[in-house]
Image (tube, rainbow, N blue to C red):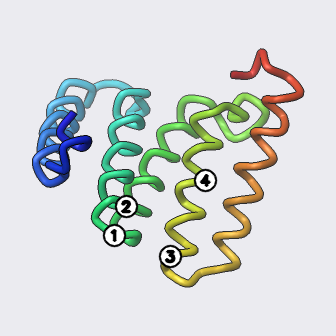
Amino acid sequence: MKRATSRIDEATGDLKEALAILREVLAKSDGNNFVIGFIYVELGELALDKHSPTEALRYFESAMKHWHGIYGKGDMADNEWVATTYGFMARCHKANGNNKLAEENKQKCMDIYQKIKVNPEKQ
């Protein structure tokens, strides 16, 4: 809601506070958590809203670490969360002038979405 009303800094602060609480609560686990990955994606989107692609990229890379920790890096990782995060990372690289990395991440995103389309049970 705060993002929709252009209260981006307030939304970012709220998410960072939630992230700190979750990290503390989950410190005894393996460190990979869906909610934390989701918060990183949201923080990345907020950073993109502020036209901060370098900051956003750090958040998306952190989210990807959680996705790989949860889903692995093989066929199990072929899901919408991983694909979407690659898409966001492509946007960040493109905005930063890293066209090669932008294209690589865009292709990963598209490849996964194609697999999901062919095998919808992977969603």
In the depicted view, which residue is nearer to us: 55 or 62?
Answer: 55
Q: Label 3, secondary structure: give it.
A: helix
Q: CA distance from mark 4 to mark 3?
A: 13 Å
At 60% from the left and 63% from the top, the residue drawn is 90
Q: Label 1, secondary structure: give it.
A: loop
Q: According to the image, label 1 marks what residue?
A: 51
Q: Earlier in the sequence, mark 1 or mark 4?
A: 1
Q: According to the image, label 3 marks what residue?
A: 95
- As drawn, is 23 to the left or to the right of 114? left
Q: Position of residue 37 (x, y in %)?
A: 41, 37
User: In the image, which disc is placed on residue 48?
Assistant: 2
User: In the image, which disc is placed on residue 119?
Assistant: none
Q: According to the image, label 4 marks what residue?
A: 87
- As drawn, is 83 to the left or to the right of 21? right
92 up-or-down from 21: above or below = below
Q: CA distance from mark 1 to mark 4?
A: 16 Å
Callout 1: few (<14), some (14-19), or many (20+) C-alpha neighbours within 10 Å? few
Q: Position of residue 43 (x, y in %)?
A: 31, 49
Callout 4: few (<14), some (14-19), or many (20+) C-alpha neighbours within 10 Å? many
Residue lying farthest to the right in this orientation: 118
Three-letter residue code for mark 1: His
Residues tagged 2 and 1 counted as in contact (Cβ below 8 A): yes
> Of tags 1 and 4, which is closer to the observer?
1
Three-letter residue code for mark 2: Leu
Q: Earlier in the sequence, mark 3 or mark 1?
A: 1
